[in-house]
Amino acid sequence: MTSTVYHAESSARVFKGVAEDYIAIHNWFDASKEMFADFRHRALRHHSQGIFEAERVFGHSITNSDGKIIPVRYIGEQHVLEDCGGKIPTVADWLSAIKAEPWMARATPTLLKHGTRETR
C-alpha cells in the first residue's frame, strides 16, 4: 500500500473501530520510508522480528474506539501481509537478498590505547 492511511482504514474494516485507532502502528512500520523511499525500506521492519518489535513499542494490545482489545501482533501481521504479497518474511529472507559488496566485509583495524581510539 502506498499510504499508512490505507493500512489504517484496512485495519478498521478488519478489526472495527476507526482508522485513527491504528494509524500510529502503521506509521511506525513505514517510518523507514524517510530513509529509503522505495519498497526496500520494508527490509527494516516488515518481517517477523519487526512485528515483535512493534509489540515492544506499542504493547501487546490496543483498545480501539469500539472498546475492542486488538493484539498489536495482528495489526502488524496485517500490515506486513498487505505489503509483502501475503507473506511474512523473516529478517533472513530480507538479508539474504542483499548482494554482498567487498566494502561490507572489510574491517578497519583500530587500537584502543589509554582511552583513545587510534587507527593504524
Image (spheres, helix red, strand yellow):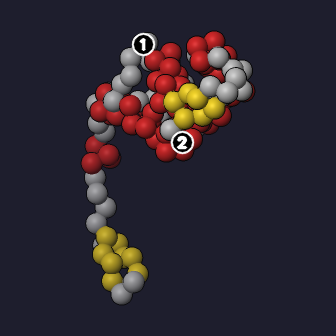
Which quarter of the image is occupied by the C terminus?
Answer: bottom left
- Binning the other alpha carbons within 10 Å of mark 2 as few (below 14), some (14 to 19) or many (20 upward) gives few
**106 or 47, which is in the foreground?**
47
Which amino acid, mark 2? Gly
Q: Which label belongs to residue 23?
A: none
Give residue 51's position: percent from left, percent from top.
45, 33
**Element type at marker 2?**
loop
Quote the CA–CA distance across marks 1 and 2: 24 Å
Residue 42 visible in the picture:
no
Residue located beneath label 2 in the image: 59
Q: Which label belongs to residue 86?
A: 1
For the point 40% across and 81% down, the residue is: 116
Say if 36 sits above or below 118 in the image: above
For the point 30% across and 75% down, the residue is: 111
Q: Nearer the viewer, mark 1 or mark 2?
A: 2
Q: Quadrant of residue 61?
A: top right
**Element type at marker 1?**
loop
Which label's residue is closer to the chain start, 1 or 2?
2
For the point 27% across and 48% down, the residue is: 105
Residue found at the far bottom of this picture: 114
Which amino acid, mark 1? Gly
Which quarter of the image is occupied by the N terminus?
Answer: top right
Give residue 70's position: percent from left, percent from top.
56, 27
